[in-house]
Amino acid sequence: MEHPIHIDERYKFSSGLKKVLGIVLIIGVVLLAGGIIMGVMGVGEHHETSTDAANPLYNLKEASETPFTTQGPTEMSPESGVVEHDAAHGDEAHPRGSGNAAADAATSHAGPTWLTRLYSNFWINNLFFTGLAIAGLFWVAIQYAAQAGWSAGFKRIPLAMASWLPVAAVLMLVTWLIANHDLFHWTHEALYDETSPDYDPIIAGKKGYLNTFFYLARMVVFFAIWIIFFYLIRRESMREDIHGGTSYWYTLRKYSAIFLVLFAVSSSMAAWDWVMSLDPHWFSTLFGWYVFASWWVSAIAAITLIVVLLREAGYLKIVNANHLHDLGKFLFAFSIFWTYLWFSQFLLIYYANIPEESIYYIERLTSDYYSPIFFINLFLNFLFPFLVLMTRDAKRHSIFLKIVCTVVLFGHWLDFYLMVTPAVMKDFGGFGLMEVGLILIYASAFGFVVMSALTKMNLIPKHHPMLQESMHHHI
């Protein structure tokens, strides 16, 4: 016997769930404190020491760094295709000094310290959870732009996820202002001084784009655009609940279309600024799409997981197995899409074998620490969801969706970890209490914001013009 659908349904943020999120937050704080204490004491520090200098990949890694850290002529070895120094000039590589006292204090002679690792983890979580929020808003906008009716019944879930955007803006800005010298090599002034031994002509040539004022201006503009459209879309959606009619739906379509154009530009530029500029010598023409794909798949997994959990808690009776099937298909399809972009980026760089491009993969594949994570990342984000969700039944059962969504969310957090940590920490990366603690802190805070946002609006947009289509969705 099916339960009746109540379109005036309101979500109640139960004290039990608040308690669970509070416990997760406390555990996260304790683990983070433990990780910091271990870092201060130097316990469990990782340093890659097993790289074989005879390995041709290692030689290519060294070659890719050589042009950026030395002065004087270079030439290409005909035997190896590796850039070598002109021995007649007797040039030696200059260390990449920071040119900044604060950065030097956070980096010892042995490499980045626990403080740099802490900043790196803040940045990873900022990127990941900002992506969940902005991709949630993207989901809402794309549904309106495509005039999709099947998803109308649970459209408030991704809209609530976008409520994290104001929090994300503050966290991102504060983290950058505090940790920019530790995270971003290009922020060190000595790199632009031609009289300095640390002068870097490659980075100096990018000063017109990579400078503090323009960087911060872009960050503020990106978040301002996203937050403004979030408030506009949420406002019109809630007005629709009160007054009804189709005029709000047409207005929401217009806002969504404008937002999608702006998002296409701003999300790619944000990927260049916030991730790719961590190593300003490296670049990939696919990187904006790659980061978007990771954000998008993560958001689909989060939306699906929240929908399933709310449905099991007695909410969202409008959602049936057909809706879950479509969500499962989205997750399945875009996991493949992410893999397509991953493989395209890897294959193009591998085939061209240009040192300044291939260094990204060399740092991750020649390391005894990062190499296993590199392949685990591919397994979690492609092979696992591909194999589990291949059948029709798997996409229609909550247990499979919950498992896959959880795995994919962690897998794409790991994807951002692999983008950020090797660039910031080099061979000194690690995964321990600090990483787990911050994941739990951010996840509990994100959950609290999303669940609180759901209590402030109807769980189902009761006057949505296509709500009847969603109620009778069948495939």
Image (cartoon, rainbow, N blue to C red):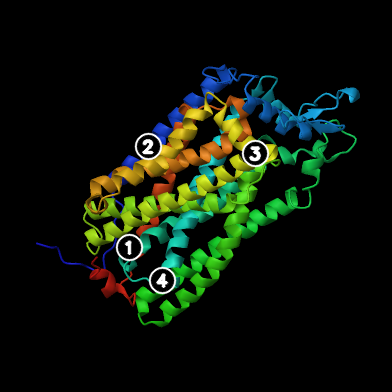
Q: Which mark is residue 353?
A: 3
First of labels 4, 2 by sequence position:
2
Q: CA distance from mark 1 to mark 2?
A: 26 Å
Above-or-below relation of 202 to 71: below
Residue farthest toward the left in the current orientation of the protein: 1
Where in the figure is residue 62, as x and y percent of width and height?
A: 70, 27
Look at discs 1 and 2 and give the one toward the viewer: 1
Q: CA distance from mark 1 to mark 4?
A: 13 Å
What SS does tag 2 mark? helix
Residue farthest toward the front in the current orientation of the protein: 79
Q: CA distance from mark 2 to mark 3?
A: 45 Å
Describe residue 180's horizontal placement relative to residue 400 as left or right: right
Q: Are marks 3 and 1 in contact (CB under 8 Å)?
A: no
The kind of residue tagged 2 is Val
Q: Are marks 4 and 3 in contact (CB under 8 Å)?
A: no
Label 4: which residue? 237
Tally of marks: 4
Q: CA distance from mark 3 to mark 1?
A: 46 Å
Bin the neighbour count of mark 3 within 10 Å (Cα to Cα): few under 14, some 14-19, many 20 and up.
Answer: some
The kind of residue tagged 4 is Ser
Q: Choose between 382 and 297: the one closer to the eye.
A: 382
Q: Which mark is residue 24?
A: 2
The kind of residue tagged 3 is Asn
Question: Dividing the image into 4 quarters, which one contains the C terminus?
Answer: bottom left
Label 1: which residue? 154
First of labels 1, 2 by sequence position:
2
First of labels 3, 1 by sequence position:
1
What SS does tag 3 mark? loop
What SS does tag 1 mark? helix
Q: Choose between 9 and 218: the one closer to the eye.
A: 218
What SS does tag 4 mark? helix
Please give the name of the residue rendered at 75% of the width and 48% of the height, measured from the top-left corner. 211
